[in-house]
Amino acid sequence: MFRFHLRLFAWLTLLAFLLGGIVLLFRAPLRAWAYAVTGEEELLAQVKGAGQYIGNVARPQPHFQDETAVRYVDVNPFGINTFLEQEVEEAKRERSLQMIREAGLGWIRQEFPWEDIEIHGKGDFQDRRWEPYRSAWDKYDNIVALADKYGIQIIARLDNPPAWSRAENNAWNAKYPPDDYNDFGDFVYAVVSRYRGRIKFYQIWNEPNLVDEWGEVSAQEYVNLLKIAYTRAKAADPDCVILAGALAATIELDGHTQGRGISDLIYLQQMYDAGAAAYFDILSIQGYGLWSGPTDRRMHPRVIRFGRPEYIREIMVKNGDAHKPIWISELSWSYPPEGIPPIYGRVRDEATRARYVVEAYQRIGAEWPWVGVTCFWFFKRATDLERGEAWYYFRMVEPDFTPLPVYEEMRRYIASRGE
């Protein structure tokens, strides 16, 4: 009986604590504190999140070695992902870059898809898919020229092999790597040679730790490809800077084709074990907030939150790469309409999404001196045919160039910084 009463007392005490916490959190200052450490807007989520934040003390926290000088961080930190290669009209490419420059964004992360440049066979840079035939370089020359015109730097993303580079063509997935990595190395050499002195930064692949982007995930195989690409790029332009393929934040452990991928934390260490450190200048990662805001400071390696780059930084430090920066290749929150499954999270409204993005840049600037460029995902799509897809709702501007609140909020924020 005594133990029953003791347990009852313990439960009542816990209930009283929780109720007291709820009452206290109704007070504005404490609600503000709860948001500042949990990134949660709703009361009950804040109460639960506050307890999880306090739980940080029970887990080892990352160490960053912030006193180390880091390269490639003294730059305009504001970038954005573009799909300019999908705009048929040159005027729309130019309007995109005009708006990007007017917002104060200094970078575009733009794919140069291998399958759209070396289309029909090795060494063949003609586009004969439609008449009149033309050089496959024309579109990309135009993009580079427009970026020059508006003073915008390019992070050129190199991936997406052509069907001819695999014996099975596109039978499995058009994004899977080629049979011979040297074919990719030749493509990298061709791109870097052509744009030497005009494009300096190149990213080798995207999300290689995901099945959708690589097939049967293997850090060793990715490093084999990265080594060839790095070597060929530096041969073409010794001054170019190579970004490793952006790692997707995931907690998956199955890297086979029936799974989704391998945790970015595990995969990065596997990359280092395979000798990757000698073959990239900048590490790139994805930086989504998903279900909570940018102020979320709850740290757990098995839960994906905005603070996850801190774990990535610790791995870099442990492997002797404290002098290298992280660049965040994709950052955003999503507001899909009702009826679209919120597989990437859903914020309250577009105004909240705009606020979160600005707060994310503020946190990065104030707390992560080892982060250089952060690229918003994404500017716009050429059409609205993908509006039934959840990822479509990360856009900053509608296909007809109508800006969403996040565009105006970012423009005001960047202007206030004098970038």
Image (tube, rainbow, N blue to C red):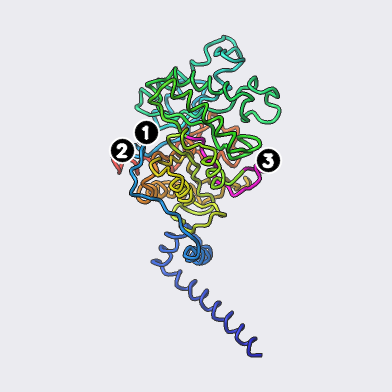
Q: Which residue type carries mark 3?
A: His
Q: What stretch is highlighted in magenta?
A: 244-261
Q: Residues within 10 Å of mark 2 (few under 14, many from 20)?
A: some
Label 1 sits on a secondary structure element that is: loop
In the rendered structure, are the residues bearing label 3 and label 1 in contact, judged by CB atoms less than 8 Å apart? no
* Residue at the spot 41% in from the left edge and 67% down from the top edge: 30
Q: Which quadrant of the structure image shows residue 213?
A: top right
Rendered image: mark on residue 106: 1
Q: Which residue is drawn at 57% across and 12% down?
A: 124
Q: Is mark 3 on a helix, strand or loop?
A: loop
Q: Taking 123 as reference, is 12 above or below it? A: below
- Labelled disc at residue 256: 3
Q: The residue under label 1 is which amino acid type?
A: Gly
Residue 263 is labelled as: none
* Residue 118 shows in the view: yes
Task: Tell me the residue that label 2 is attached to.
Answer: 419
Frontmost of labels 3 and 1 is 3
Residue 236 in the image: state x and y as whole percent: 44, 20
